[in-house]
Image: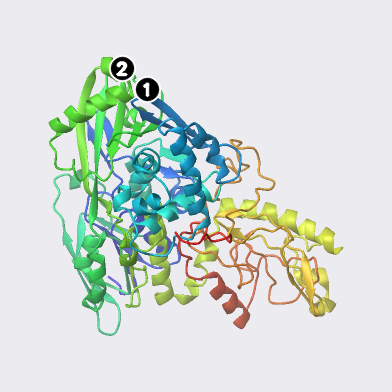
Amino acid sequence: MTADRVVVVGGGLAGISAAIELAEHGLPVTLLESRPWLGGATWSFGRRGLTIDNGQHAFLRCFTAYQDLLIRLGVRDSVALQDRLDLTVLAADGSHRIRRNSLPAPLHLAGTLASYGLLSRGERLGVVPAVMAMWLSDLSRPGRASVAEWLRRHGQGERARRRLWEVFLVPVLNAVSEQADLSTAAGVINAALLTSRDRADIGMSSVPLRDLHGRPAATVLATLGVEVRVCARAAALTSMRGGGFSVRVDSVSDESQSAQMSFGHQESDEIYAAGVVLAVPAWSAAELVPPELSADVNAWRKLTPSPVVSIHVTYGASVTRLPFALSGDSSLRWIADKTRSAGLRTGQYLAASIPAADKFVDAPSAALREKFLPVLDRLFPAAASAGVEDFFVTRERSATFRPVPGSAAFRPDQMTNLPGFALAGAWTNTGWPDTMEGAVRSGRRAADCVLRALAPAEADTVELDRLRPRMRVQADAWRAVTTRFAAELSGHTATPAGMPAAAARGDAAASGATAQIAVQETDSRLSERAMPAARVGSAEVAKPAPDAEPANGTKSAEVGTRAEGAESANGSGLAAHGPVAAKATPADTVTPAGEGTSAGKVTPAGKVAPAGKVTPAGKGRPAGSGVPAASGKRAASARRAVIKEPVALNAPDAVPERAKAAGQ
């Protein structure tokens, strides 16, 4: 085993993302997974001829990094993403619909709040100032406040917290409001509900999770040349004198191993590696890190697991037409129709999740059946006469870390003090709760840390290379529009695509001025803003139009987007105003306007071009990448500007530049 390779420990979404990133940049990679499959906490098993998912794993449109992973795995068509948020909340007194309108956030939910039947009229009116306070406040700073404490200070009573706020927050955080960290909750609320109207649209897999994550990942990793070892546990990680790491690997016996995925060479029990990505839960990572990081482990040990219990019921007849729903007045939070994905031909199969399930994780199945079957009968009246064909329970005792107040301070960055050693996992500092989005982001960032340590030249282009093909198509389209617009403003003709700038401008252009057209990718969406040039001395610099919004994109006008629900030109089904599924995501890299070169911005090619002319993409860059040729110190400076550390989340979209309310 050569010592120049990187070992990724853990085959969940974080480890898969890290391994793909590293392999795509030319490093040899070995991935170790102790279980017989890839996919981590998202897995499936067989029961009575059906394929059962271990839990319900929905995602939101703001999960841009996760959606990009699906594209890279070739399974984007295996999920269904709503054109418009439409969610039914079930309760004893009937159903209540949460549906957004076409107004900008946060007004897009005004109609829903006005008619939300689970609250009284006075409670509904009281929600408005609390929503506005959260929208106007910066709650991203770590502290020890809980969500419930903040809501009480802003007039939210017990019923409002339980029947409205926790309906959304508990399934996402896997914690009730009394035990949920305020900064973590505020980040996801802002990302999904308060920054753009389409960010909370819900997506679900239409295939079993093993066919969405684990199996496609195995195929992609094999294609990239990654050596994958399943049923192989990293038993010890040691930092070696002179650099590099020793990874001792123990085989894990499993009766079903022969029937499970197993590939790659498995004769070695020790691997010498130049870098390591440790992508396992916090409580496992604490036992594996080299002694040099033992001082940091004390903080991680404060992160404890939170369980999820899932109730699975097959009925002899159909009981509901809803694809999924939330329960507003019971411990059953998320209920999904899994009939089709599981392969059931007659009747209906419902799966219901109980997040923050400390009270139920050790309860016998018979007790859970006695308690929750009547709840389902009440929520779905047809269930009472449909007949129960099967009832069973799955339990994830360590489904997520528990985001208790103050836990944000315990979450470490992906980069450690050991060069070439990085941490990954949704429990690390991503600014997101323990979600699939947080896992993917952590894996990417961990890979970036290793690349910076082992291959700085490659790391310089990591963020730029994340402009995936679908984004490049849209970037090209917007660049053509804005280039033509700027040319009309300046009275010059833009350089034709693919023509060398020197041929178009002549030698005299060396003393000319440059018109920069900013097509800046922030919030994982293309912000379409032509940037007219303002003369400063003898040069011209980009100047925002008078009506330009802040660069973070949180309140950007949705100009030129097509009608909601319309198919995009590339057939992806993602709305044009939604997040572009590109690897440059909001919390990964947001370069403030005016600092260096942000992903997607067209900048000069190291030489001055005439006003109104845009330098074509440089050599070695994919067409439409928006990255011009540059060299020497200028190129290095531009790359450093792009590879800025990710902004903190309250910030899947960054903290909006709006008035900050006094107090929290």
Residue 317's disc is: 2
Residue 126 visible (yes or no)? yes
* Pointers 1 and 2 in contact (C-beta within 8 Å): no
* Quadrant of the rendered image containing residue 410: bottom left
Q: Position of residue 633 (x, y in %)?
A: 60, 83
Q: Residue furthest top?
A: 385
Q: Which residue is mark 1?
A: 320
From this view, report whether residue 105 is shown above or below residue 479.
Answer: above
Q: Quadrant of residue 533?
A: bottom right
**Side (left or right) of 395 relative to 623:** left
Q: Is residue 107 left or right of residue 333?
A: right
Count of numbered circles on the image: 2
Is 274 displayed left or right of 372 in the figure? right
The amino acid type, in three-letter code, at marker 2 is Ala
Mark 1 vs mark 2, foreground winner is 1
Under mark 1, the amino acid is Thr
Q: What residue appears at the point 66 percent right and 50 percent down from the top-left corner?
A: 557
Quarter of the figure with the C terminus = bottom left
